[in-house]
Image: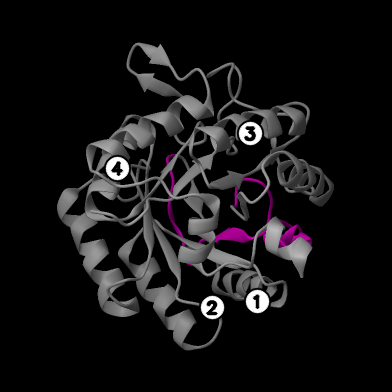
């Protein structure tokens, strides 16, 4: 199998703290340093949240702006993907940073259960977030916690609410949502290929101890892989992950195992149909 594998590193998230793992990057400077190490290890996408000084989640556009500036300086060409997830804010505050024009942003197109609450994504907010992404040339990554979310993304694409072929990420292993199930995983792939074409790119993310399992399934099946301390703070039952880069290197080993090259940032931008990286922009 020769198609390059895009590795996305979800560096921080909204929940893990330094109590869970001291390597979780909280401040903007910590996030930039952790991402740079992961970038050098093989990640070509960074999925980013921001935090307040007390480690609680935030949607502050100024924090996102500082993070974006630092990432573009220290990780040139890396794809910057902002989270519009519901743990960091409510309503349109979740998309206030989209005017900064990151390369990508997460887009959850439906609601589902989380471990202790309902993850609410009402239709009017989904429509607004999608419209903001269109207006600012931000490619959405569809976070599919359920089969219906893939079908909804197809409906939005047909309606012109999503400009390009959607990039769908299967999220499995969240308590009270979709468990890690191989038959479901395979059906997700078939559904994406049926709705969006056999060459449509897709990604998979596993939560907690299931991260390694989903990484392996995705790389082996020709998809792309998400890793990072947002989803999992451990290397195994006995060891904390020392860094985001360590989790990226684990995916690189899986790429070697399944004879797939790791996508460079240039290849990742091409696969996902993103605007040119810094070299071409400077020459324009």
Q: Which mark is residue 214?
A: 4
Q: Pointers 1 and 4 in contact (CB under 8 A)?
A: no
Q: Where's residue 258, x and y in %?
A: 23, 42
Between label 3 and label 2, give the one nearer the viewer.
3
Left or right: 63 as drawn, with respect to 109: right
Q: Between disc 4 and disc 2, whose residue precedes?
A: 2
- Residue 177 to residue 123: above or below: above
- What residue is disc 2 on? 162
Q: Where's residue 14, x and y in %?
A: 60, 38
- What residue is disc 1 on? 134
Which range of residues does the magenta coloring cover? 86-115
Q: Where's residue 144, x and y in %?
A: 40, 60
- What residue is disc 3 on? 36
Q: Between disc 3 and disc 1, whose residue precedes?
A: 3
Residue located farthest toward the right when viewing the structure as drawn: 62
Between label 3 and label 4, give the one nearer the viewer.
3
Q: Between disc 1 and disc 2, whose residue precedes?
A: 1
């Amino acid at each position: 199998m020769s198609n390059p594998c895009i590795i996305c590193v979800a560096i921080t998230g909204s929940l893990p703290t330094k109590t869970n793992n001291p390597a979780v990057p909280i401040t903007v400077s910590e996030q930039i340093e952790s991402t740079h190490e992961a970038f050098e290890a093989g990640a070509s996408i960074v999925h980013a949240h921001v935090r307040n000084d007390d480690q609680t989640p935030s949607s502050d556009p100024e924090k996102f702006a500082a993070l974006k500036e630092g990432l573009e300086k220290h990780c040139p060409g890396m794809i910057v993907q902002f989270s519009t997830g519901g743990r960091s804010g409510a309503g349109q505050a979740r998309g206030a940073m989209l005017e900064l024009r990151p390369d990508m942003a997460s887009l959850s197109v439906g609601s589902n259960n989380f471990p202790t609450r309902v993850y609410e994504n009402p239709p009017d907010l989904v429509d607004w977030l999608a419209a903001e992404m269109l207006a600012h040339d931000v490619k959405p990554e569809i976070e599919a916690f359920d089969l219906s979310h893939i079908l909804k993304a197809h409906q939005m694409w047909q309606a012109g609410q999503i400009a390009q072929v959607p990039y769908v990420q299967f999220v499995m292993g969240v308590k009270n949502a979709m468990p890690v199930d191989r038959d479901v995983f395979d059906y997700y792939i078939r559904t994406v290929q049926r709705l969006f074409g056999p060459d449509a790119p897709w990604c998979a993310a596993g939560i907690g101890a299931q991260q390694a399992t989903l990484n392996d399934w995705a790389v082996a099946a020709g998809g792309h892989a998400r890793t990072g301390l947002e989803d999992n703070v451990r290397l195994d039952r006995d060891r904390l992950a020392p860094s985001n880069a360590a989790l990226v290197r684990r995916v690189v080993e899986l790429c070697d195992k399944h004879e797939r090259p790791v996508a460079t940032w240039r290849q990742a931008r091409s696969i996902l149909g993103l605007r040119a990286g810094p070299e071409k922009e400077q020459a324009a």
